Image: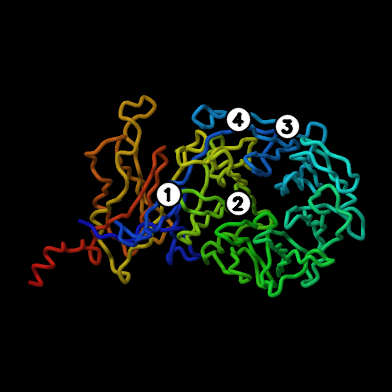
Amino acid sequence: MCAQFNFCGGSYTSQGLGFDCQRAVNLYPELHELGDGKSKMALYYTPGLKSFYTLDGASRGKFEFNGRLFDAGQTHFYEIIPTFDAFGRLVSTATTVLNPLTPLVNDGKPVSMAANETQLLIASGGFVFIYYLATTIDSVSGLPIAAGTFQQVAASNFTLSTGNAPVIQVAFCDSFFLALIANSQTICISNVLDGNNWNLNGQIIVSVYADNVVGMVVDHREVGFLGRKKSVIYFASGSLSVFDVSPGGFIEQGCGATFAISQLDNSVFWVGGDDRGNAQGWRLNGYTPVRVTTHAVELAWQSYPKISDAVSFSYQDDGHTFWQVYFPSANNSLGATWLYDTASQLWHERDNLNAVTGQMTAHPSWNHAFAFGQHIVGDWGSNKSYVMSRSYLDNDGNPIIRMRTAPHIFIEEERIAHYRFELDMDLGVGWAQDDPTHFGPPTIFLDWSNDGGKTWSNKQGRSFGYQGETRIPRPVWRRLGQARVRTYRITCSEACPVRIYNAYVNSSPGFAPTERLVKQYAKAA
């Protein structure tokens, strides 16, 4: 018998590995909400990817509206047309180019999109484009503009004192489109319900702080303008200015990345910065910023060459609401992907094995839309968009390497003899025993470190069972040597649903098995 030691958890790799070097990669923690489960926390496998459609380049932004899905590629703007079977199941898609005569301007950055009832606005490469979802009467000419029309909005609508200026983001709030001019404190306001004309309502000049506005977000019918060091909330007041500062809506926290602002969990999350430094994750509680990153996560983020190119999105799956943050410049431009789960308030990592180079890169997703009952994500490194689902056990054919580095095991720096390690996980969830595409049963590997995670032993594999097997030996490793500090790590790259509930160690001193209740009662009698 063995004693449990809280094997499951999130990522927390401290600057001193001997202090803590926990990681959860392509595994996310789920807390037991009743508190009386087999353990307080489990580790579940993250979703895989399946190719869904391709564009003329990397998807730079998706937008779902009234059951329709739109996507911006390299220079083309698309609608994704689904086909369903008689049972309402999605069977195929087609891509339709909506702008054959008016190409998008591509600066390699994400696009920003917003819509009202009849118009969809796109900010791309500093320019603004409009697609008419339905026939609309132009607020200036009084003439109808047919549904399906795609055109560029005149650059003269977006100006500074120096002339026409590039637009980096668009948004919609209370009948008005808003356009943030890059590297400025200026936000243009459209005519009412008309993203093609911006002549009537002037501009918002954010003057309550001195820095430029980095990004904006609409939440709860208010608009947040996030500067480099400070932020402010505006609302549609109905005054001559149209938008005014919300009472109490001044926030002593800035923003470090234009496209790393997301809405989730009835709040706003962003990658922040201010006079004191940058690369912290924040969420709003009312008008109060609350830190959601840990020292370990911030250590990783602040090691990246820059965070201004970070991109984030949010999604909900199996009751977990995730904030996913992608850093393109991390790890010598191989990227890094971090996810925060609002349910557990823990972070985990996701990565991807590049089948061509053999290198580990950031997870191949940087935008998201929930459409046709599916989570659809766009790949930053190819022209593919994928369905992201736990029904898929690899990343479009590439294996997903799942890894958990556990907390250190130590007893006041005494030397501990490790006799046995047992992993408590789902068994019998592999492939069929007669599957000709696989040789042998699915295997999970264990290795360990005796120096706080600096160096590791050779990996030793154990089977966790063919599909449907019920009489399976549990994954157990024996005769594991001695150490003053022992750190265990498990790794699995099999296309199987990996679910881990705990791990148990039999070692001495300190990790003897718990005495059975009947023996405890006998002693008390």
Residue 97: mark: 3
Q: Earlier in the sequence, mark 2 or mark 3?
A: 3
Nearest to the eye among marks 4 and 2: give it: 4
Q: Which quadrant would residue 185 be assigned to in this image?
A: bottom right
Q: Furthest residue to the top? A: 436
> For the residue carrying disc 3, how many other residues have a C-alpha within 10 Å: few (<14), some (14-19), or many (20+)?
some
- Between 421 and 56, the residue placed more toward the observer is 56
Element at badge 4? strand
> For the residue carrying disc 2, how many other residues have a C-alpha within 10 Å: few (<14), some (14-19), or many (20+)?
many
Contact flag, marks 3 and 4 (Cβ < 8 Å): no
Residue 232, image x, y percentages: 72, 69
Give the CA distance from mark 4 to mark 1.
34 Å
Residue name at image x 23 percent, y 66 percent? 509
Residue 343, image x, y percentages: 47, 59
Kindly identify the amino acid type of the residue bearing the numbered disc 3: Val
Q: Earlier in the sequence, mark 1 or mark 2?
A: 2
Kindly identify the amino acid type of the residue bearing the numbered disc 4: Thr
The residue to which callout 4 is attached is 93
Contact flag, marks 1 and 2 (Cβ < 8 Å): no
Give the CA distance from mark 1 to mark 2.
24 Å
Kindly identify the amino acid type of the residue bearing the numbered disc 2: Phe
Residue 403: mark: 1
Residue 313: mark: 2
Residue name at image x 48 percent, y 55 percent? 348
